[in-house]
Amino acid sequence: MSMPTYLGMPPFPDAAREAVADTRLRRNLARATGTIRERRAAAVAELADWDELRECAKQIKDHTLGHLGHYLRMLEERVTAAGGVVHWARDAAEANAIVTRLVRETGETEVVKVKSMATQEIGLNEALAEAGIAAVETDLAELIVQLGDDRPSHLLVPAIHRNRAEIREIFRRAMPSAPADLTDDPAALAEAARRHLRARFLAARVAVSGANFAVAETGTVLVVESEGNGRMCLTLPETLITVMGIEKVLPTARDLEVFLQVLPRSSTAERMNPYTSAWTGVTPGDGPRAFHLVLLDNGRTATLADAVGRQALRCIRCSACLNVCPVYARAGGHAYGSPYPGPIGAILSPQLRGLGSDVDASLPFASSLCGACYEVCPVAIDIPEVLVHLRGKAPKKPSERLAMGLAGAALASPRRLAAAQFAAGRSRRAVRRLRAPRAWTDTRDVPVPPAQSFRAWWKANRDRT
Amino acid sequence: MTGPDAPGGPDPATARDDILGRLGAPDDSVAEAYGAIRREYLRRHSEGDVRALFAERVAHYRAVVHTVTEARLPGALAAALRPGAYVLAPGLPAAWAAAIPPDRRAADGAELDAVAGVVTGCAAAIAETGTIVLDHGAGQGRRALTLVPDHHLVVVPADRIAADVPEALARLDVTRPLTFVSGPSATSDIELTRVEGVHGPRSLEVFVL
Amino acid sequence: MKIALFVTCVNDTLFPETGRAVVTVLERLGHEVVFPAGQTCCGQMHLNSGYPERALAMVSAFTGVFEPYDVIVAPSGSCAATVREWHARLAARAGRDDLAARAAELAPRVHELSELLVDVLGVTDVGAAFPHRVAYHPTCHSLRTLRLGDRPLRLLREVRGLDLADLPDASECCGFGGTFALKNGDVSAAMCADKVAAVKSTGAEVLCAADNSCLMHVGGALARQRAGVRVAHLAEILAGTGEGSPA
């Protein structure tokens, strides 16, 4: 169980400290998330039945997670019957080994890739590179990240931390076909990416994708995208390998009517995304001749065993929670030390990977619990609830345990609380000079305890007993 | 075929059994539980003229929209052609393409990257979202045909337009390859601002009958 | 009406003037306020910091102390939200079914101050005067958990002499978040800086909210900057008579 690229990441507060000081990053994030917030709200407000769609999406996901074995067996049977081959991977290493072997069997040394969170999660590109296979990312933002030798910082727009001027520089440096007079006009940048990738699409013989949904009843797999790079990868090569987290399965084709409404509006704030592709096994004369579906666990069954935490597996990777999160907007995606940044990452990464590393143990605390994420989540994941739950499980420093223990003892009885208040009131000046934590006093004044607590005032002025 | 894995690789049977084992034994309550899911959302979001709504919504994506009669369609298609050859999807009604001269029609097996565009019909359309659905049957061609050429001319007969997503899905066979197209290819990857025209057709021209 | 005051541990210890203001407002409206002496804390700090077992002890104590009362008021959105949204859930998760049932039964009787005034007592004009320009910050738990909506604004609009300013990006979190302000001090301070800038842009002299913890955070930054904006809890403004300092 691992996400290999991210080993040894510092805890969230340390990484966030650098991000907060990065003025360009702050501006890039504020602009991008500010734009999408209002547009998402408008796209959602257009549907009078949003709450009902959201409730149904939640129920479908919960139902599926509750009968996941049933639906995965059905999916396997239907994909196989339609000419596909199903593989099972318990963890990242197994999934990478399967994909590497499948690519090797084709004799190819290059694969084209559709943006996929699952393959980010398992570090597939790095594993393929070790085996001498080049993975070419074809999503514009993934391409920006790959050419910039960077890491993704957003679920949907992995290069959200880069502005147009930075993207132009990356293209001029790392894209041989980029014109010398490339401007930072987004249309010109998109055109450069189109030219750069076109020959590769037409020559590609193997593609690797993720999946947004898979329908158990029919064995149909879907990819939701915008640019057409997904269609290129899913259609032109001879071999298609799809890596899918086991929680992506849906019971029936009818369920798509809910998710194809809630996902685009939550994600890119569109009524519908430009392209959605659906395929069932292989179709003679149209598209790949070989289709492999790799079903990935990698911590999902363990997450499912947690009655509170399992709701994180409802996630459809829309990224609405990132776009409204005040912490994400200031700390950026890299601070989360995982391909899953933002509020959903803060509950998903520590569950998929466990709370053992510094960064994972810090993620449940990387939130002010403001609740904006829960409000916009199209599958109603109560992210604050899961954060609080994971805080209970996270390891804590002895000094903090002691302080919370003392506070707990003072609050355990009104008599002890009154005694503490009395002591604080008698030593107000001393308290004022006391070294309060620097994290507070760096930017804020400390309140001075009053001479008389409320309960003391009540006793003196109102208590008739 | 069940995917035998190479020697030295993971044992596929073990991985499968392990994962399914952690998910518990099959149970017969699934169908009943599935039926209990509450679907209180609307089947459609607007009443009224689906053709007009579709035309408005698809235009919103900066697709070019023509609302034409069947009689005027051939002339409108011919007039929309840009320099170069066009592929006519196999099975496209001959009457639709009647005004496209033979020398503008790409030969069978033409290099898709070298043609100017493609003319197709569609399996369904969705008014609410301005979406065209291809099932790559007669008159639509295999998937690559509507992907590689830069100019996609698509004819949408009024009776193919569903009011909303649920109604459209009910009309489709999801086991066919499906492509849902909502406007020309686009990206929001630069500063979360939408730009039309990346890898898919950069021009989508819709002829609503 | 007899109303039990859950003053909250933060107000009791650090901001007693807020508790006194609640007493002033409710007595002015002709109600009887009682202060159950056995009260301490709702458990929010321990719950949100990852000590649910300690929070559970406070759930048990709170339930025992307030069960006898029909109407309970808390001048804190986040404490009222903790009682209403979390107490029964915490008890149920710990397998304390009996406590969970009692907490669930008690929860709807616990009101944040503006809910009590507008929904239970049916008043928006509480007879206050406060001749100052005021910006209102809807704290996260007030806004998204309790869904107070415009109740506080309706109360403020009826205050004589009060000039209500429109706060830009009002629904954005101020960055307090309890121990978040300490554990993630940099992000917290960055959020606070933006809130402070929004407050200053309104030209308000007073920033008002239904939670003193958030006000302590934003107010601490305003004070550090000598920004010329002070903070006041909603109760203190509603207790104002326009003469001297409020409450």
Image (cartoon, rainbow, N blue to C red):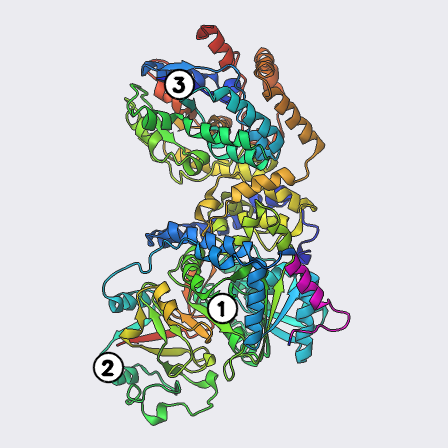
Residue A200 in the image: x percent, y percent? 56, 77
Residue C197 located within the stretch drawn in magenta: no
Q: Is residue A148 above or below residue C191?
A: below
- Residue at x-position 51% and y-position 47%: A329
Q: Is residue A352 above or below residue A70?
A: above
Residue at the extreme front? B28
Residue A62 in the image: x percent, y percent? 51, 52
Residue assigned mark 3: C3
- Residue at x-position 45% and y-position 76%: B176
Residue type at mark 2: give it: Glu
Magenta stretch bounds: B2-21
Residue C166 in the image: x percent, y percent? 34, 35
Residue assigned mark 1: A182
Residue B8 located within the stretch drawn in magenta: yes
Return the residue nearer the eye: A77 or B135.
A77
Please indicate whether residue C122 sits to the left or right of residue B85 in the image.
Answer: left
Residue type at mark 3: give it: Ile
In this rendering, does residue C179 appear at all? no
Where, by quadrant of the figure, is residue B35 drawn? Answer: bottom left
Return the residue nearer the eye: B109 or C112.
C112
